[in-house]
């Protein structure tokens, strides 16, 4: 009798879990924000389409729901929308570290968001180098500027390559399609 009850409970648990395959949970960390701050979740391309909101408590926030499609979203601090992160809302556990602007925020947890964060990290590192070189070029004698310009051009190509390679590597998923549809690489000479 006891074994039949355990088997029924296990079967019910499996059915329940299989029905939850389209659920998501966002675990957010916002240690620099204030208790009571409101975090908004909206579609990235239609930010007046708010999907949800939550309140920061003890440096944390969370949201959960159901989605049957993967969509590109943005979570942001209501009182300062520049404090934000763009990410893919999809079934699974998503972790967000929301930092005050201009400190970059971070996302992880699902394979798409891990790939998206990796791309953002690469572009950020290369972009920081590009900015430093451009600042150096403006203070450099003209005979050294040509070499600096070559270095700037090389970094610009690397950034473009990171983006297009990520798009091609992910061409069969939402991330790749987003990049392919929205990124127009520069025409290099």
Image (spheres, helix red, strand yellow):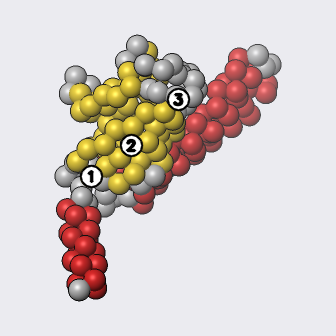
Identify whether 15 is placed above or below 47: below
Single out the residue that lies furthest toward the front. Answer: 1
Label tally: 3
Return the disc, 2 or 3, that comes first in the chain's sequence.
2
Badge number at residue 26: 2
What residue did someone put label 3 on? 59
Residue 181 pos. (x, y %)? 29, 44
Say few, some or many: other residues with alpha carbon within 10 Å of mark 1 (under 14 / 14 to 19 / 20 or more).
some
Q: Looking at the picture, how far across and down is residue 67, in whole percent? A: 22, 48
Q: SS of the residue at dot 1?
A: strand
Sort mark 2 into few (<14), some (14-19) or many (20+) by Cα contacts within 10 Å.
many
- The residue that appears at 26% across and 25% down in the rendered structure is 47
The residue under label 1 is 23
Mark found first going from the N terminus, 3 or 1: 1
Give the residue at x 62% y 39%.
126
Dot 3 falls on a residue whose secondary structure is loop
Q: Position of residue 100 (x, y in %)?
A: 54, 22
């Amino acid at each position: 009798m006891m074994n039949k009850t355990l088997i029924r409970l296990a079967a019910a648990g499996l059915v329940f879990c299989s029905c939850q395959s389209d659920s998501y949970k966002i675990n957010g960390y916002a240690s620099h924000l204030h208790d009571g701050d409101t975090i908004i979740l909206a579609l990235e391309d239609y930010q007046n389409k708010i999907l949800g909101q939550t309140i920061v408590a003890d440096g944390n926030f969370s949201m959960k729901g159901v989605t049957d499609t993967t969509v590109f979203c943005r979570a942001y601090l209501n009182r300062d929308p520049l404090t934000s992160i763009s990410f893919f809302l999809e079934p699974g556990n998503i972790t967000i570290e929301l930092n005050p602007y201009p400190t970059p925020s971070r996302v992880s947890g699902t394979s798409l968001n891990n790939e998206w964060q990796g791309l953002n990290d690469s572009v950020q590192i290369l972009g920081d180098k590009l900015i430093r070189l451009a600042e150096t070029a403006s203070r450099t004698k003209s005979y050294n500027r040509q070499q600096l310009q070559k270095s700037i051009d090389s970094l610009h190509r690397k950034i473009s390559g990171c983006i297009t390679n990520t798009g091609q590597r992910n061409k069969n998923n939402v991330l790749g399609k987003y990049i392919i549809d929205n990124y127009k690489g520069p025409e290099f000479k």
